[in-house]
């Protein structure tokens, strides 16, 4: 085994290095998380004066886009190539125990928003479990020669707990190494081990890092929101301006010309009350040159057209169909339209599945090795659900055709449906019961009473049970 270059570095120094990396990552990812959470405050260049700026209208299309991509990426199965049934059951147990579908969803959002995410493999109750680790408190040290993770750390501030303590840890950490995992706490500015180390002896760091859209030669990720944020800011500005216009000019304005100041005063020279002026308009407009008119309300058609154009631009950037972003008609899209609209986003997600599948496979392979002690020669294969929007009729029709052509077994069909081993076992039992009932029904149908009557007639003519001598037809007359 090649010696790791971090073996001669003290754990405290490694944790301090990871702490600096986490601080820098939190700063870099802050803008993207604010847009995803709807907390961003874009600098809007409004067309109105500050006195008419009442509130901002924020468009959180970033969360819509990220969630749409995440929802379409669903793990169907984790398969061990050439593995036994016991191997497959072990892998399925790791998946269920880890609540991997939920953990993967969090990991997937992490890698889409700031551009990088992490999966850790930890020993919990003597069994391995795969967990998503937040990029806001996780760091890895990568050997640029081999591209492998040499050290990883998760550092966080502990929550306040009931009960008084003389010394309270300001930070807690998990330090991942090639052969050990160790917990730490920081008290009085110094890192101290917490409990005994876990000697997993895997030879690899059980912390997998994924960098979105990574280019060769770099270990940096790219946020999926980079191109979308400017369009979202423009949308927010357009809607904010439209809202202000509606408040200021949305209703018709009345005007009066040719009115003199004395017309607003009573005979004593005091300003007339509003109700008096309202009910005495003939007196108020007694001057011949006075005229009352009404200005039309401001039109917002230009704002609507601008939003339509921006939505189409956002659709082009994200690949999401325009109907998913709000441009829709009263008529639902046909099946062909759905397929055509989703070509870009489906192809993009298929590419993501290839890249993300490598990271998920690494974590699953590490978890399998941690549980069984066996290192896989071929990594775990990750199979995905169809990222498109197939109808139930489409999916059923495809499976029926493959089954009728003897190109697919029941087991494979169940895997395509995303069923686990427990469901398969129950279904096999039910199919066996139905098969037995069908065979019994077929046997009962073949039992014809006329045959019994014929047999009794033969016996009555002197045939003996067990006598194999055939009777001639004439002998039965």
Image (spheres, rainbow, N blue to C red):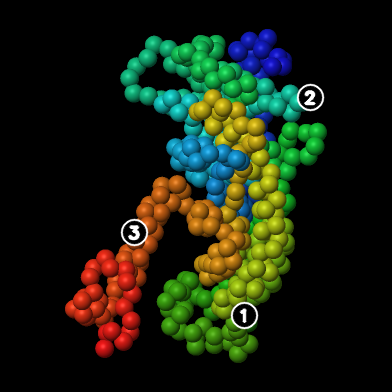
Q: Quick check: 169 above or below 100?
A: above
In front: label 1 or label 3: 3
Give the residue number, with chain letter if any, for mark 3.
433
Is mark 1 in CB contact (under 8 Å) with mark 2? Answer: no
| Label 1 Cα crowd, 10 Å radius (few <14 / some 14-19 / many 20+) | few
Residue linked to disc 2: 145
Mark 3 is surrounded, within 10 Å at the Cα level, by few (under 14), some (14 to 19) or many (20 or more) other residues, namely few
Q: Is residue 135 above or below residue 160?
A: below
Asked if 105 appears above or below 375 in the picture, the reply is below
Q: Which mark is residue 296?
A: 1
Mark earlier in primary sequence (1, 2): 2
Q: Secondary structure at mark 1?
A: loop
Mark pair 1, 3: CA separation:
77 Å
Label 3, secondary structure: give it: helix
Q: Is residue 421 visible?
A: yes
Q: Nearer the viewer, mark 3 or mark 2?
A: 3
Which element type, helix, strand or loop, lies under badge 2?
loop
Separation (CA) of disc 3 from disc 2: 59 Å
């Amino acid at each position: 085994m090649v010696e790791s270059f971090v073996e001669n570095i003290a754990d405290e120094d490694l944790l301090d290095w990871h702490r600096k990396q986490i601080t820098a990552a939190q700063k870099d990812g802050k803008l993207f998380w604010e847009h995803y959470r709807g907390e961003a405050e874009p600098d809007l260049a409004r067309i109105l004066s500050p006195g008419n700026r009442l509130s901002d209208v924020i468009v959180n299309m970033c969360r819509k886009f990220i969630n749409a991509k995440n929802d379409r990426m669903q793990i169907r199965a984790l398969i061990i190539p050439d593995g036994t049934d016991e191997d497959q059951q072990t892998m399925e147990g790791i998946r269920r125990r880890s609540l991997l579908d939920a953990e993967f969803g969090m990991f997937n959002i992490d890698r889409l928003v700031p551009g990088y995410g992490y999966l850790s493999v930890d020993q919990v109750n003597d069994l391995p479990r795969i967990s998503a680790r937040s990029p806001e408190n996780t760091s890895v040290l990568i050997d640029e020669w081999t591209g492998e993770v040499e050290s990883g750390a998760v550092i966080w501030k502990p929550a306040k707990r009931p009960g008084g303590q003389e010394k309270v840890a300001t930070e807690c950490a998990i330090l991942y190494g090639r052969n050990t995992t160790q917990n730490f706490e920081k008290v009085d500015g110094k890192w101290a081990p917490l409990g005994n180390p876990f000697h997993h002896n895997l030879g690899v760091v059980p912390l997998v890092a994924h960098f979105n859209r990574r280019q060769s030669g770099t270990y940096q990720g790219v946020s999926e929101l980079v191109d979308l944020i400017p369009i979202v800011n423009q949308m927010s500005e357009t809607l904010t301006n439209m809202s202000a216009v509606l408040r200021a000019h949305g209703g018709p304005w009345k005007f009066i010309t040719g009115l003199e100041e004395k017309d607003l005063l009573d005979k004593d020279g005091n300003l007339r009350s509003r109700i008096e002026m309202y009910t005495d308009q003939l007196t108020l407009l007694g001057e011949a040159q006075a005229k009352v008119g009404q200005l039309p309300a401001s039109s917002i058609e230009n704002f609507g057209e601008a939003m339509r154009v921006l939505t189409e631009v956002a659709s082009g950037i994200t690949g999401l169909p325009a109907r998913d972003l709000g441009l829709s008609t009263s008529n639902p899209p046909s099946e062909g339209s759905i397929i055509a609209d989703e070509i870009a986003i489906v192809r993009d997600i298929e590419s993501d599945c290839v890249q993300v599948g490598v990271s998920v496979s690494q974590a699953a392979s590490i978890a399998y090795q941690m549980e069984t002690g066996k290192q896989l020669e071929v990594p775990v294969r990750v199979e995905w659900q169809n990222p498109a929007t197939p109808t139930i009729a489409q999916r059923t029709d495809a499976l029926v055709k493959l089954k009728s052509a003897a190109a697919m077994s029941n087991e494979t069909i169940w895997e395509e449906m995303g069923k686990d081993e427990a469901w398969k076992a129950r279904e096999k039992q039910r199919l066996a019961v139905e098969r037995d009932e069908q065979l019994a029904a077929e046997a009962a149908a073949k039992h014809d009473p006329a045959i019994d009557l014929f047999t009794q007639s033969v016996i009555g003519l002197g045939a003996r049970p067990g006598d194999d001598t055939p009777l001639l037809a004439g002998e039965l007359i």
